[in-house]
Image (cartoon, rainbow, N blue to C red):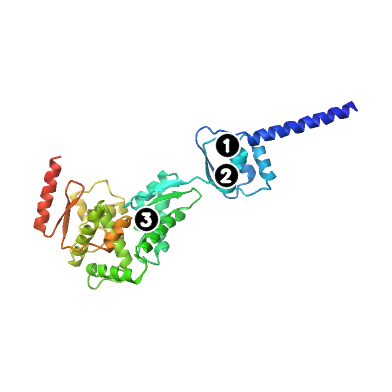
Amino acid sequence: MNIVRKIVWLVLIAVVGTAGWFAWAVMTPTEPSGQAFVLLRPGSSTHHIAAELKTAGVIRSEEAFVLWHYYHHGRSLKAGEYLFDKPANIIDIQKRLRRGDVYFHTVVVPEGYTMFDIARAIEAAGLGPADDFLKEAQSDTALIADFAPQARSLEGYLFPDTYEFSRMMTMHDMAAAMVKQFRTVAHQMNLISGESAQARLRVVADRAQSAGAPPETPNDVERTVIMASIVEKETAVAEERPLVASVYYNRLAKKIALDADPSIIYAELLAGTYQGALHHADMQFHSPYNTYRNAGLPPGPIGNPGRSALEAAMHPAETDYYYFVADAQGHHRFAHTIEEHNKNVLAYRKAMRGR
């Protein structure tokens, strides 16, 4: 009888001890040492998830994590990247995993960024190699084929904004999110919808379209985005953008080369030869994007314009300006004639020497 009692007591002690250990392991918060990022891939088993969390110092016991999960009938734990930087117990952690409270990386795309800039920003955010995004941006034109059928890449249609991306997203997902934002803004502006919008674009396009244009010439939307990308690169002053657009439309109408320096920079970026500064010899760089050597618009956008630049390209000012140059104060001086322009250039150079 005494032996039976001892066995019962031993079993009871073991049960109580196990229950105490389980309660401690499940309910006691664990504090990670600093920020702990854990990437849980789709299809991972509960045991694998527990092992990842234990390795990261997020939980004390893999066994307790698995038992608590099965106690809740194995409710789905969502894949994704999670950040653990505060004390939490297994109960809290499993609630987060069931909600899919994943960590998002912020990617800021300023107005005028090229696809090359965006690719570097994505890599800097820890979302993957820049080259992978570039390949996507240079190839997946199906995303914009309905309104930009002649587009050579997604350049111009990766709308500037602040994005929140997770590491579970593909490069296609990220590019598609930027194109979706372009669509949203373009619809709001009636850039890619509405008969009245198309009529306005046709008026603008007629000012720029030369006689006998080849059939591969970009459509009204594409021309507007190309123009907006040039305007975006030429001035950061919003109120000047309609004036800059007017200069370029006036030059197009007279079949005068645009002579836009940013187009040369972009040509060299495409070729992988840009050294960070332009020199006089670069004006002869062989590329269809070089607007010094080639009259008319370049074959595609040279960056990703924001709303203000798109508005300027859609609604240019009515002027007879054909030239503009910086004034050393962050603005530009506009001119009707080459003589007036040369005076403005001299004034700019003098101001720069006086600094």
Mark 1 and mark 3: Cα distance apart in space: 38 Å
Earlier in the chain: of badge 1 and badge 3, it is 1
Pointer 3 residue:
159
**How crowded is the residue under tag 3: few (<14 C-alpha within 10 Å), some, or many (20+)?**
many
Residue 349's tag is: none
Say if 42 sits above or below 315 in the image: above
Q: Disc 1 marks which residue? A: 88
Q: Is residue 270 above or below residue 203?
A: above
Q: Does 12 sit above or below residue 292? A: above
Give the residue pinned by disc 2. 96
In the rendered structure, which disc, 2 or 1, sits on the residue that comes first in sequence?
A: 1
Q: Residues within 10 Å of mark 2 (few under 14, many from 20)?
A: some
Residue found 64% across the figure and 42% down from its top: 47
Question: Which kind of residue does numbered mark 1 sit on?
Answer: Ala
Q: Nearer the viewer, residue 256 or 21?
A: 21
Residue 285 shows in this picture: no
**Residue lying at 41% horizontally and 46% vertically, measured from the top left:** 123
Residue 106, percent from left and from top:
43, 46
